[in-house]
Amino acid sequence: MLKKCKLQNKEASVILVHGLWMNGMELSLLRHRLNRFGYQPWSFRYFSTRLDLTEIAMRLNTFVEQIPAQTIHFVGHSLGGLVILKLFEVFPRQRPGRIIALSPPYQGSETAKRFIRFPGGRNLIGRSITQLLDGDVPAWSGERDLGVIAGTLNFGFGRLIGAVGRSGDGTISLEEMRIPEARAFITLRVSHMGLVVSRKVAVETYHFLEHGRFSIASS
């Protein structure tokens, strides 16, 4: 059972950003755990296939502006991590806070590249992922604490179609998750979707948001 922890900054909120084809409901358990740790969590929802990254970032910025908190952290799962980076690229003047990216496809996605070849695949993938596959990836300066948690339980659609080799979370490979200038990068034995329900991921997320580092050594 999770213990409710006393925060160093009681005014801190956390915005959770979901990934492709999701609506934020899959982040409910992570949201609950972060609330147990003492944070005020918020879920940002967006149309992951209808909008490009800049349009999503604009909506996220409007969402952030409505949150009454001195400190605002961000946690993004998969594509959600890149949405957060796009926010800081387009709207860099944000309130203090740290960022966690859970298996972000920052270096591209072989799974998406193969999926897009299927009939109707481009429409199903949508504009934001197509944009990333075309090389339009948000720049990251490293001026803010960013931690990456990568899954290594290699079970998922990407592995089934041969897009992910031996190292990855079943959807994204470890090499694709690397973000230059990230403060820390750790691996945990969970799958791509397992990241959002793992207790260990929640604990490491809390630790990084509080201290700017994970409790275990970077990989």
Image (cartoon, helix red, strand yellow):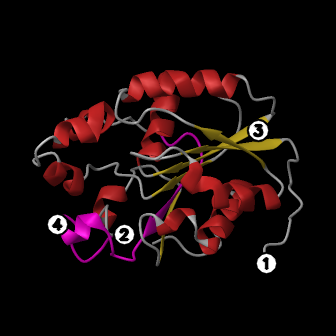
The span from disc 1 to disc 3 (Cα, nearest Å) is 27 Å
Residue 162: x, y in percent? 15, 69
Element class at badge 3? strand
Residue 138 on the magenta span = no
Disc sitting over residue 71 in the figure? 3
Q: Earlier in the sequence, mark 2 or mark 4?
A: 4
The amino acid beneath tag 1 is Met
- In percent of the image, x 64 and y 26: which residue is there? 63
Real-space CA distance between mark 2 and mark 3, rounded to the nearest whole angstrom: 31 Å
- In three-dimensional space, the C-alpha distance between marks 4 and 1, rounded to whole angstroms, equals 37 Å
User: Are the residues flagged by discs 4 and 1 in contact, CB closer than 8 Å?
Assistant: no
Rendered residue at 45%/72% (across/down): 219
Which of the two residues, 58 or 48, is positioned nearer the viewer here? 48
Q: Secondary structure at mark 4?
A: loop
Give the number of the mark in front: 2 or 3. 2
For disc 2, the neighbor class at 10 Å (few under 14, some 14 to 19, many from 20) is many
Q: Which residue is mark 4?
A: 161
